[in-house]
Amino acid sequence: MCKNVNINSMVKSRIYYDGRRPTKDGKGHLRVVLNLKGESAMVSLGISIFAHQWENEEIVKHPDADLLNKVISIKKGTVNRCLLELSATGGLERMTVQKLAEIIKGKLDPSYAEKKKKTEEEAATRRRSFLLFFESKVKEKKNHGTKTLYYDTLHKIESFCRLQRVEPTTLTFEDITKTWLTSFEQFCLNSECQNTASRHLRDIRAIINCAIDEDLTNNYPFRRFRIKKEETIDKSYTAEELRQLFSHNCYPGGEQESVDIFKLMFCLIGINCIDLFYATKAQRGRLTYVRAKTHKPYSIKIEPEAAEIINKYSGRDYLLNIIDRSPNYKTYFNRMGKTLRKVGKVRIDGKRSEGDAILPDICTGSARTSWGTIAQEELDIPRDVIAAALGHHTVDVTSTYLRTDWKKKVDEANRKVLDWVFHQKKS
């Protein structure tokens, strides 16, 4: 069933009929067994036959027996010549049997060697390419919101590379220098605010940290580059101002929906647009998700005011149906913000309106800032509870000694805010 070939005492080879993993029709495979320094590995000859067709080290009772035996003879000769060359040059002394098997595979099947070379080149390119590594890390993200934000940064980098007439995939980790970061930031500021540009830079920093952890680079350009933060303009509103918005007799359609969704965001403690857009169905009366901005888990109790709106705009697979109608969250919420800033104006025709808007400077972020402002300024809710409600709470030294049920405190705080805004009742 096999034939031994000894090149020297260090290496042996033989042909072996392997029936352990037969084909669907029951055929086994002919393989070269290599033994080097007491370790073994097998290389396929690419020939499959039935067990009774292998006798006395040759193929019998097969319609192409003569041809296949000649092929086997040629391949055995190729293996022996390769082993002799390696033995003569001393290559076997510092080689593992797995490495030897790879060499033999390449000799027996030139296409395998080409495929392996191509695969290694592609792997090397991926290791060098910042964007390919960036994309691979984004694909690992499970949270839709987080993944969308990272893809947004990825596409921004691609646009920047093309502006500089650089093929995006050729951008290496070493190309990300302080100068590159400064130019990229300026490119972002041409169409985005400082905080959005800074988010892109934080995403880049996170990916570079991953690459350093995986020993793909030692380059860390953020040692000498500071990510800026722009103070957000205060667009928060009092409870009375929100009551005017929520009680306004809106035009049906887009205007009413915009007010409804803003109201829902407020009821959910100022949930961010992207988190609401990708939110899944509530479980046991709570909306649980991972915040796209901080990547931390978060849970909000669904109060009756929020449940009413959720039921009105219930989605098929997600919490709301807006994702079924508008696949891009930015497009939806930008349009929603523009609509909110017109609420209160009188429509003249399909395009024009006149009069004053109720809250002309409102934006989707106002739901979050208004919740916090009302909680602190109008209801005197403790600052640490507000921080926990907005997802900003950090555990200090004192907190490590206290068993604080923050979820319960946040639920109570939200109920107080909603009672005050919607029912003018302080508790």
Image (cartoon, rainbow, N blue to C red):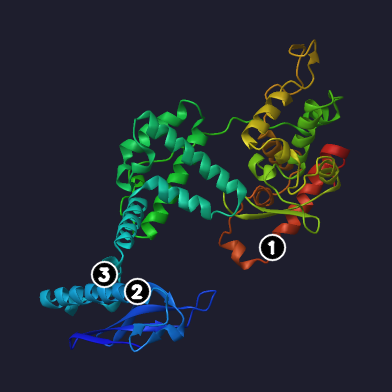
Which mark is first along the chain, 3 or 2? 2
Q: Spatial distance from mark 2 to mark 3, Cα to Cα? A: 23 Å
Give the image location of residue 277, x and y in percent.
Answer: 68, 42
Asked if the residue at tag 3 contacts the one at tag 2, i.e. Cβ–Cβ closer than 8 Å, the answer is no
Label 1 sits on residue:
404
Identified by mark 1, the residue type is Thr
Q: Which of labels 1 and 2 is toward the front?
A: 2
| Residue 46 falls in image quadrant | bottom left
In front here: 226 or 285? 285
Image quarter (top left, top right, bottom left or bottom right) of the N terminus: bottom left
Q: Is residue 369 left or right of residue 135?
A: right
48 versus 206 height, above or below: below
Q: Is residue 214 left or right of residue 249?
A: left
Q: Give residue 53's quadrant in the image.
A: bottom left
Q: Residue 68, labelled with which disc? A: 2
Q: CA distance from mark 1 to mark 2?
A: 77 Å
